[in-house]
C-alpha cells in the first residue's frame, strides 16, 4: 500500500500488513491457492461485495455505451460497434481507470487476498514460481498499487455482421412469440 514511509522503516514491522491478512485472508483458501498453482488464475468468492460488483458493472457498461458500444444490447453489437472500444489485442474491451475499479484495487480484502496468494506462490520460489530474486527476501505483504486492466471478453461469434443479423432475427422472433402468448 502506497505511502511515503522509507522502505527501511517498512521492513521493521509487518504488523499492519499481517493484520490485514489476518482480517481478510480467510477468503483465500488452500483450495483457491491450489487452483491458482494449477491454472494461473483464481476466482475468490466474496472478495468483492455484490454492491461493489454492481457499481463496477454499471460503470463499465456506461463507459462502453458512451463510446458507442452498448454491451446491454448484444443483439445490436457487431464488429463495427465493438471496434469503438476494443483494442487490436483481441476481442476484449480493456478498462483501466474506472473509479469503482480503483476502489476494489484499494480494498483491504483485495490486498489481503493478493498478499496471501503471493506468500503462498511467488514467495515460495518453488516450481513454476521460481524467480531470480529468491535470494533477496522479497515480502509479498509489502505490495505496491499498480494499474491493471479489467477485460470484458465477448464471444467471438458476436463480432461478425452475420452473427449480429442472426441475433436480431432471433430476438425479433422471441418478441413476436411473447406477444402471441400474451393474447
Image: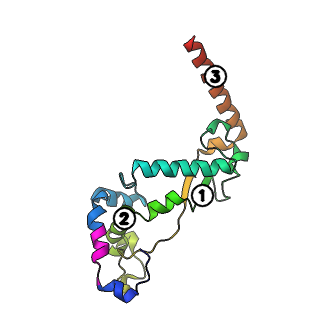
Residue at image mark 3: 173
- Residue shown at 57% from the left, 51% from the top: 60
Q: Which mark is residue 112?
A: none
Residue 153 visible: no
Q: Secondary structure at mark 2?
A: helix
Report x, y in % for residue 102: 49, 62
Residue 99 as seen in the image, left or right of residue 46: right
Q: Quadrant of the N terminus?
A: bottom left
Kindly state the secondary structure of the residue where label 1 is placed.
strand
Q: Main secondary structure of the magenta part?
A: helix
Please report contact status of discs 1 and 2: CB closer than 8 Å, yes or no: no
Q: Which residue is mark 2?
A: 108
Q: Where 101 sits versus 130, above or below?
A: above
Q: How far across and how far down the image is residue 70, in percent?
A: 64, 44
x, y percentage for residue 133? 41, 82
Q: Quadrant of residue 112?
A: bottom left
Amino acid at each position: 500500500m502506497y505511502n511515503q514511509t522509507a522502505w527501511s522503516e517498512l521492513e521493521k514491522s509487518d504488523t499492519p500488513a499481517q493484520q490485514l491478512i489476518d482480517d481478510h485472508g480467510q477468503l483465500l483458501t488452500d483450495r483457491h491457492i491450489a487452483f491458482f498453482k494449477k491454472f494461473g488464475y483464481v476466482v475468490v468468492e466474496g472478495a468483492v461485495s455484490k454492491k461493489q460488483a454492481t457499481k463496477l458493472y454499471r460503470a463499465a457498461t456506461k463507459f462502453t455505451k458512451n463510446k458507442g458500444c452498448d454491451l446491454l444490447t448484444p443483439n445490436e453489437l457487431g464488429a463495427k460497434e465493438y471496434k469503438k472500444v476494443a483494442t487490436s489485442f483481441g476481442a476484449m474491451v480493456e478498462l483501466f481507470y474506472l473509479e469503482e475499479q480503483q476502489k476494489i484495487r484499494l480494498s483491504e480484502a483485495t490486498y489481503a487476498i493478493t498478499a496471501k496468494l503471493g506468500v503462498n506462490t511467488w514467495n515460495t520460489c518453488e516450481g513454476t514460481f521460481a524467480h531470480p530474486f529468491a535470494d533477496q527476501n522479497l515480502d509479498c505483504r509489502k505490495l505496491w498499487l499498480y494499474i491493471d486492466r479489467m477485460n470484458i471478453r465477448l464471444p467471438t461469434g458476436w463480432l461478425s455482421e452475420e452473427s449480429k443479423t442472426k441475433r436480431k432475427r432471433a430476438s425479433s422472433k422471441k418478441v413476436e412469440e411473447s406477444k402471441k402468448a400474451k393474447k
